[in-house]
Every structure is written in C-alpha cells, then in structure tokens.
Image: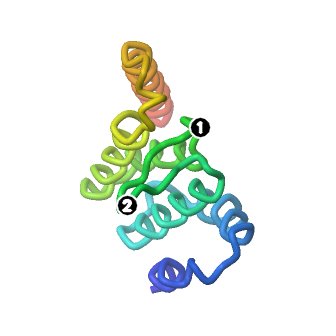
Amino acid sequence: MCFEWFTKGQHDLESDVQQQLFKEKILKLESYEITMNGFNLFKTFFENVNLCDHRLKRQGAQLYVEKLELVGMDFIWKIAMESPDEEIANEAIQLIINYSYINLNPRLKKDSVSLHKKFIADCYTRLEVSKKNFNLSF
C-alpha cells in the first residue's frame, strides 16, 4: 500500500526530493524482496529521475536513452538476477533489454557492432559475478 501511495504521489515531489528518495531509500531495498508494487514504484522513480537528469527523453509515450549510464540500472540487474518472482524478474529483464539496446537514441545506435559486443560482455560479466556469489553462499 505504501508503494502504491508513493507511486501515485511521486509527481507531487520536487525533482531533487525524488532523486534523494530514489538514491537513498529505493535503491537500498533488498532486490530479492521486491514485490510487483515495489517494482512499479522503482520503475516510476527510475524513469522520472533519469528524465530529470536528461539521461532519458520522452517522445510521445516512448522513452529513449540519451546517455547509457542510467541511474538505477545496476539495481534492475539485481532484481533480474535475484528476484524469486518470475514475473518481476522478466519485467526487469525487459527493462534491461529496452534501456540497454532497443530504446536507444539513434546516435547511440550508430556503431551497432560495438553496442552488441558491449551488451553481451556486460551480460556475461554480470552472470559470472552472480555465479561466483551463488557458489560462495553454498
């Protein structure tokens, strides 16, 4: 219920307050405990914080990546890799694909080979780290 309230009232907060709340509270949540309401809250703040930082740009109903270094992207990866809820993990994976590859500003897509290599390398590195962390826990 609290997550729903914050999601609905988020537009009433100044952008600096949104950024502070996002960075100091939302990004500190345990990624494996995120519910769908919590994920929707995260996504709303993620989009607004990155829009305010000019890292994302809205064109109609679509958001496009202007800068590849999005605030909160590491947390999306953590949700994708750690959520026990398959629906939430799939939503996070879709965000990763959209914001790392599909919804990029055309100028960022000019060197598609390099973009592919970077995306695949990032996926591989994160999977390796996750595998090591998983092995350490047993």
Closer to the camera, 73 or 87? 73
Tell me what residue is drawn at x 56 percent, y 78 percent. 10
Q: Amino acid at mark 1?
A: Glu
Q: Which residue is mark 2?
A: 60
Tell me what residue is drawn at x 42 percent, y 55 percent. 59
Q: Nearer the viewer, mark 2 or mark 1?
A: 2
Residue 10 vertical position relative to residue 98 in the rendered view, above or below? below
Answer few, some or many: residues within 10 Å of disc 1's Cα (few below 14, many 20 plus, some between 14 and 19): few
State left or right for residue 48 relative to residue 61. Answer: right
Q: Which residue is mark 1?
A: 69
**Dot 2 or dot 1, earlier in sequence:** 2
Closer to the camera, 48 or 30? 48
For the C terminus, the image quarter is top left
Q: Position of residue 1 (x, y in %)?
A: 45, 86
Q: Position of residue 57 (x, y in %)?
A: 51, 52
Closer to the camera, 137 or 11? 11
